[in-house]
Image (cartoon, grey):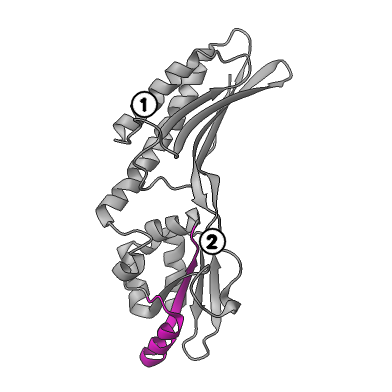
Amino acid sequence: MNTMLNASTMFTLSAINKLYLVVEIGGKTVPQEYKSTILESLKATTDDLKIDTKGYDPRSLAVLVNEMKVNESTVINIQLLIGEEVHRLGSNDKTFALTYQTMGHFMFNEGDDLEDAFEDTLDTMLAKFSEQYTEENKKITKVVINEENFASEMKYETNYEEAVKKSKKLQKNIMLVLVSNYCPWCRKFEQRVLLKEEVNDIIQKNYIPLILNREKDPFPKEFDTGFTPIVHFIDYKTQKSYKNVIGYNNKDEFTYILKTDTSK
């Protein structure tokens, strides 16, 4: 019997304080009676994390189980998901989206212990969920900085023209961070990289930091690649981007980029 789990997730679990629990089992191998056991495991996990699960909530934490045949074996797939309504990118329309997803599966053959394999796989998935939730919400509690107050708390400019004036006056290049509304990697980049004291010290010392929302803030469209997050390093003399960093980079990677740029 082989069990496999996905190694990482792009989703964040910060600021989730209420969930509605859902379990759905498809196929004939996993008995429907497992639903109560799965719900108990979900309830125990959310109780430990102090997440409210009483009553209905439009944000659901779901376990979905399905199966498929591979030769003489049956592959049991388990998904752990969070689904909720979010604003569609570029509009005020709402749409249902998965804001967390992790998967595990195992091969089941006749004579194997289904219950042990199922519980081991689900327990490992819930442990990873708990670990990520605890880590990310400790940071939120400790720092108390989020998307709304990031710029003011971290001393970032929020107006392109004002940032240009300041950069010319101080003769410092601009570090422009472009983000968007529904962008898990943007939030992760802010929380896990830009909030770090050692990273912010380098930024504040060497650049005029500027953060803009590509969906609503005015800025020269030459800096819009269609991807977020993206960081542009802009020359204060020419207002041209001489380097850009697309996508999420972890703290060590981004620190190296900053140090390489500032050592020139």
Label 2: which residue? Answer: 247
Secondary structure of residue under mark 1: helix
In the depicted view, which residue is nearer to us: 159 or 154? 159
Q: CA distance from mark 1 to mark 2?
A: 35 Å
* Callouts 1 and 2 close, C-beta under 8 Å: no
Q: Position of residue 248 (x, y in %)?
A: 50, 59
- Identify which amino acid the numbered label 2 is placed on: Gly
Identify the residue position indicated by label 1 in the image: 43
Quarter holding residue 127: top left
Q: What's the amino acid at mark 1? A: Lys
Residue 48 place in picture, x, y as percent: 30, 31
In the figure, residue 91 lies in which quadrant?
bottom right
Residue 244 higher or lower than 47, as above or below: below
Q: 197 or 239, which lies in front?
A: 239
Membership of 163 in magenta stretch: yes
In the image, residue 230 above or below residue 9: below
- Magenta residues? 157-181
x, y percentage for residue 84? Answer: 48, 43
Q: Is residue 154 above or below residue 191?
A: below
Q: In screen coordinates, is 221 left or right of 10?
A: right
What residue sits 51% from the left and 74% below the top? Answer: 232
